Amino acid sequence: MSTVKLTVNGKSVSATVEDRTLLVHLLRENLNLTGTHVGCDTSQCGACIVHIDGKAVKSCTTLVGQIDGANVTTIEGIAKGDQLHPMQAAFRDNHGLQCGYCTPGMIMSAIDIVNRHASDLDEETVRQELEGNICRCTGYHNIVKSVLDAAGRMKVAQAAE
Ligand code: FES
Ligand code: FES
């Protein structure tokens, strides 16, 4: 057992966990942040993706004990009150989801993709970068459209800050 301190969606969290505890289990079972999903047991689907210190990471393959002191953001932490994050709004407006199971992971990945590629983001890059996120419903076209749309919206939002 070890005691780990984290910041999760801006709040300080202290947890005493077994060494084998995965971040996705801490989020869902201890902190009740169930927007982060588990869609596989092979680290392929990306439904569990969150941000650790601003970078997209699969929480199903991250041990809590590895990330003492980290800043974790989940899908529950990206809207500002009632105002959706630009990526969430773009998924809504471009029909980038159907059942929604993959969507939290898609959105957290997509924000990281836009942050890393800034102005050189194109359709091919989005498709390549989303390789680690599986969607079983949409056929991906509207997801790619959503990410490209959100890239523009995020630029506008950043300029306004
Ligand atoms: S649950 Fe993490 S990659 Fe599928
Ligand atoms: S919207 Fe159903 S799995 Fe992607």
Image (cartoon, rainbow, N blue to C red):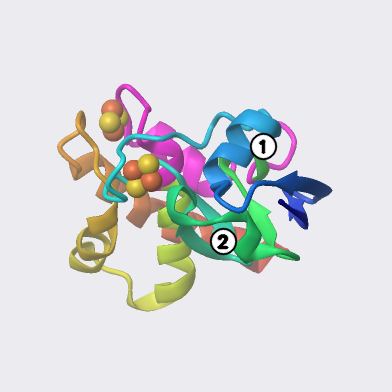
Tell me which corner region of the image, top left, top right, bottom left or bottom right, holds residue 35: top right
Residue extending furthest toward the top: 99
Between marks 2 and 1 in the image, the one whose residue lies nearer the viewer: 1
Tell me which corner region of the image, top left, top right, bottom left or bottom right, holds residue 120: bottom left
Q: Assign a secondary structure to mark 2.
A: helix
**Residue range of the region highlighted in magenta in the rendering:** 78-106
- From the top left corner, tell me how far across and down residue 136 is, in percent: 20, 32
Residue 88 within the segment the image draws in magenta: yes
Question: What residue is drawn where x is 63% and y is 40%?
Answer: 26
Ligand 2's quadrant: top left
- From the top left corner, tell me how far across and down residue 41 is, in percent: 31, 41
Determine the CA span between mark 2 and mark 1. 15 Å
Q: Assign a secondary structure to mark 1.
A: loop
Question: What residue is drawn where x is 21% and y is 62%?
Answer: 123
Residue 152, numbered label: none
- From the top left corner, tell me how far across and down residue 109 is, in percent: 42, 55
Residue extending furthest toward the left: 139
Along the viewing direction, whichever of 56 and 66 lies nearer the viewer:
66
Residue at mark 1: 83
Type of amino acid under label 2: Val
Type of amino acid under label 1: Gln
Residue 152 within the segment the image draws in magenta: no
Mark 1 residue CB less than 8 A from any atom of ligand 2: no
In the image, residue 72 sits, relative to residue 88, either above or below, namely: below
Question: What residue is drawn where x is 77% and y is 46%?
Answer: 15
Along the viewing direction, whichever of 11 and 120 lies nearer the viewer:
11
Residue at mark 2: 156
Q: Is residue 66 left or right of residue 127?
A: right
Q: Would you call the spot at circle 2 few (<14 residues within 10 Å), some (14-19), or many (20 or more)?
A: few
Q: Is residue 74 left or right of residue 114?
A: right
- From the top left corner, tell me how far across and down residue 96 is, in percent: 32, 36
- Disc with the residue nearer the chain's start (2 vs 1): 1
